[in-house]
């Protein structure tokens, strides 16, 4: 069991780290997208309140 698990862990570690990096990048991208959409939604609302 251990002899099989060691090479698997050795091969899976770079895949896991790459996956977490992609997940972090996608989450930050989603946060920026949400922030931009929130600002875009907030602008017409503020204009409507002024008018």
Image (spheres, rainbow, N blue to C red):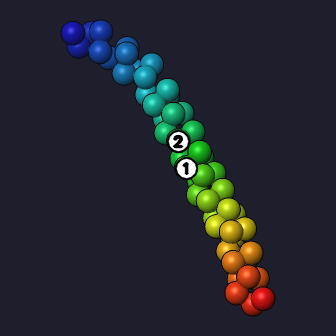
Q: Which mark is residue 41?
A: none
Q: How many marks?
A: 2
Q: CA distance from mark 1 to mark 2?
A: 6 Å
Which residue is most to the left?
1
**18 horizontally vs 47: left or right:** left
- Asked whether residue 17 is in view, the answer is yes
Of residues 41 and 11, the one nearer the viewer is 41
**23 horizontally vs 39: left or right:** left
The residue depicted at 51 percent of the width and 33 percent of the height is: 19
Of residues 39 and 12, the one nearer the viewer is 39
Q: Splitting the image into 4 quarters, where does residue 31 fall?
A: bottom right
Q: Position of residue 47 (x, y in %)?
A: 76, 82
Tell me if residue 6 comes above or below residue 41 in the rendering: above
Q: Splitting the image into 4 quarters, where does residue 4 fall?
A: top left
Asked if the residues shown at circle 1 and circle 2 are in contact, with their CB atoms under 8 angstroms apart, the answer is yes
The quarter of the rendered structure image containing the N terminus is top left
Q: Which mark is residue 27?
A: 1
The residue depicted at 78 percent of the width and 88 percent of the height is: 51
Q: Splitting the image into 4 quarters, where does residue 12 fall?
A: top left
Tell me if residue 18 comes above or below residue 3 in the rendering: below
**23 horizontally vs 42: left or right:** left
User: Which secondary structure lies at badge 1?
Assistant: helix
Q: Position of residue 33 (x, y in %)?
A: 66, 56
Tell me if residue 20 comes above or below residue 28 in the rendering: above
- Residue that badge 2 annotates: 23
Of residues 36 and 8, the one nearer the viewer is 36
């Amino acid at each position: 069991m251990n002899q099989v698990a060691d090479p698997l862990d050795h091969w899976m570690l770079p895949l896991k780290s790459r996956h977490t990096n992609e997940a972090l990048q996608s989450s930050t991208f989603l946060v920026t997208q949400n922030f931009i959409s929130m600002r875009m939604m907030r602008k017409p609302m503020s204009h409507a309140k002024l008018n």
